[in-house]
Amino acid sequence: MRRRRWKRVLIGAFAGCAVLVDAGAAAAQAAASTEQVAIATPPAGSAAWVQDHSLGRALPDPATTSAGTVAAFFASLKPAELDRLLTEYPLVVGNFDGAPLDVRYRANRLAVAAERERARARAADHSLDSAERALAVSRANDCDHLLQAGRQILAFDPRGRGLVSEVFGDLARAQRVSVLVPGSDADLGHHDQASEPLRSPAGMARALLAEEQRQAPDTVSAVVAWTGYVTPSGLGPDAVTSRLADVAAPRLERLLGGLKETTAPTAPPALFCHSYGSVVCGIAAPDIPPATGADGEPAGITDVVVFGSPGMGVESAAELGGGVQVWATRNPTDWIGNVPYLEFGGLGHGADPTGGGFGAEEISSAGAAGHNGYLATGTHSLQNFASIALGRYRAVSHTLPAQS
């Protein structure tokens, strides 16, 4: 009885704090309806792909095949074979970590275009109610934006709210690669917002890449805005448990495995984990080994930068393994600081990564405001993030300036 009572208290504490500081009382009434269905299975077309023996050999199973095996398979294909598979199974090919980058970009243009046409057909279907048709119009517009010239869509899955990952910069040639792991409300409809761009994964990725290019114009950099998992919606129950992050972490690990096969940066990709994204990174971190070079010698560890974090699911950075270096920041006006940093009965995400005893390198975010302002121009956090992404660790500022 006591355990159940404490669980109710904790739910109230988490939801209550978040609602009071960020969303208002109306969010509390809607929270129960925001629970999301995690996507753990391969994309549509995977079953037919596995059963396709037209090449006289088995095709790699999207659910189980390693990125290295995927890379070897695609390297073995003749141009005509590749074109046929790409055309018949664009969602499979476009989401296959380990497949060549240019092949994935091509496949995802086909997949996005197909989803746009499907949405347009639904929007014109008067047998559907007005709400369904309005959602279809929105989906078609979102897809249309992704089809603009020059966009590099690394992954696309139209299921549910829609998953999309986009590359900014030249990933194939990049010397430094970063992966932005977003938090709640990231999905196809919120991937790239013209209004308040720093609330969207694409906007944050653009800001990080621009700052890297400002600091090191001679370094080829790339940033992946990775919404490769179903994020919590709003401030409901999903935001205070690791249920969605538990499914997301293996997907993030597969992404990193694919980047290892298809890119050749001078250091492992850096992870920038915002809000609930830091829970995903915390679960994935113990399975990220230290990188090794071609000669088998150590070649660096993965920088994991958490900002606006509710916790990483652990009590100290030492629990995250020896393959990562954790950096953390939270600005004083970020409402996430009012959420309890604890874990009890599956609720909460553990200790505060910016706490003195956690063991992360605490960096300055001076100039940043609120929960989404960390990549705003001129902030210490944006400057520090770019310096970490570039491996310019001596340029990172760790302390806040004195207040006037």
Image (cartoon, rainbow, N blue to C red):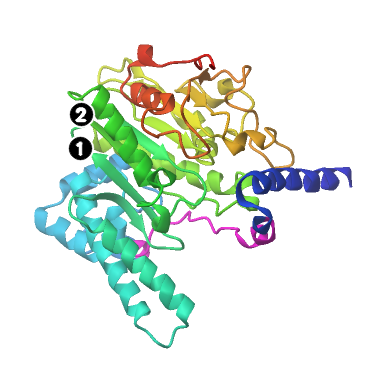
The image quadrant of residue 112 is bottom left
Above or below: residue 286 compared with residue 195 = above
Which residue occupies 33% across, 68% down?
Answer: 140
Whether pointer 1 and pointer 2 mark residues with C-beta atoms closer than 8 Å, the reply is yes
Q: Does residue 317 lie above or below 126 as drawn?
A: above
Q: Residue at x 30, y 68 (%)?
A: 116
Regarding mark 1 in the picture, which secondary structure is present there? loop
Magenta segment includes 38: yes
Percent of width and height locating residue 326: 49, 23
Magenta-drawn segment: 28-47
Crowd tier of the residue under label 1, counting other residues whose Cα lies within 10 Å: few below 14, some 14–19, many 20 or above: some
From the top left corner, tell me how far across and down residue 82 is, in percent. 16, 56
For numbered disc 2, what is the local secondary structure? loop
Q: Is residue 237 visible?
A: yes
Q: Earlier in the sequence, mark 1 or mark 2?
A: 1
Front-most of 362 and 360? 362
**Which residue lies under the disc numbered 2?**
220
Q: Which amino acid does label 2 sit on?
A: Val
